[in-house]
Amino acid sequence: NTMANFKSLPIDQFLTNLATKQPTPGGGAAAAIGGAIGSAAASMAAAYTQRKKDKESGAAAKADELIIALDVAPLLQAADDDAAAYADLQRTWKEGGMPAEEKVAIEARALSIPTSLLESCHAQIVKIHDFLPYCNTNITSDAKVGIHQLAGAARSAYQTVLVNSPPAEEKMRLLKLLKEIRDLEDEILS
């Protein structure tokens, strides 16, 4: 069902829907849900950075800032937005008499959703990375899981961007963000 509310589906139902031969959910929704999972994992690491010594050192305040920054709602909404944009895009292929300006607006929206998702993942990764020195050392691995999940979501969103034929300069801008993400991942893997 194209207009499904993916963000409220049980995970097993979302995965079943994703695995079937139907237009949505597709790669864009998978990227968004993957990003939300990464964001939640890093939020958990911040939630565990609330001990007495974290409060005294200021780490708990940094954790609180991260929790606010890692709002999963927009990432989950992107899954539904991607499905709606794809349904509209399908209309541009099927409706011969669609006004050119409407078609251009639909194509722009289809490109903007995965672009915004990639940008959101990048921003969250930077915030998580900056938080790592303050993170409860017993759970730093979960913050890093968040980075890796968000990185995968960003790369996945980029694949959806490519399907929507972005201008060359936009591709280069987004590839630069992906390179920054890769550099941060490489740093935490060593």
Image: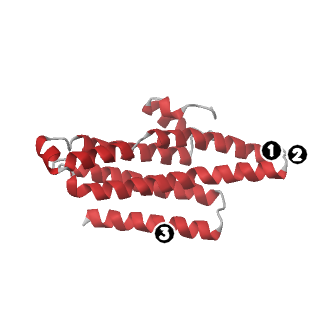
Looking at the rendered structure, the kind of residue marked 2 is: Gly
Image coordinates of residue 111 in percent, x first then y, are 63, 54
Compare residues 61 and 41 and report the one nearer the observer. 61
Q: Which residue is mark 2?
A: 97
Looking at the rendered structure, the kind of residue marked 1 is: Lys
Q: Earlier in the sequence, mark 2 or mark 3?
A: 2
3D distance between C-alphas at marks 1 and 2: 9 Å
Numbered circles on residues, count: 3
Q: Which residue is mark 1?
A: 94
Label 2: how many residues lie within 10 Å, few (<14), some (14-19) or many (20+)?
few
Which residue is rendered at x = 65% and y = 50% of the image?
110
Q: Quadrant of residue 40?
A: top left
Q: Is residue 19 visible?
A: no
Q: Which mark is residue 176?
A: 3
Quarter of the image with the C terminus is: bottom left
**76 with respect to 100 (left or right):** left
Quarter of the image with the N terminus is: top right
Q: Is residue 78 visible?
A: yes
* Callout 1 touching callout 2 (CB < 8 Å): no
**85 with respect to 149 (left or right):** right
Q: Quadrant of residue 5?
A: top right
Residue at disc 3, secondary structure: helix
Image coordinates of residue 171 in percent, x first then y, are 58, 67
Residue at disc 2, secondary structure: loop
Specify the farthest residue to the right.
97
Looking at the rendered structure, the kind of residue marked 3 is: Lys
Q: Which mark is residue 18?
A: none
Image coordinates of residue 121 in percent, x first then y, are 44, 53
Which residue is rendered at x = 41% and y = 42% of the image?
71
Q: Earlier in the sequence, mark 3 or mark 1?
A: 1
3D distance between C-alphas at marks 3 and 1: 35 Å
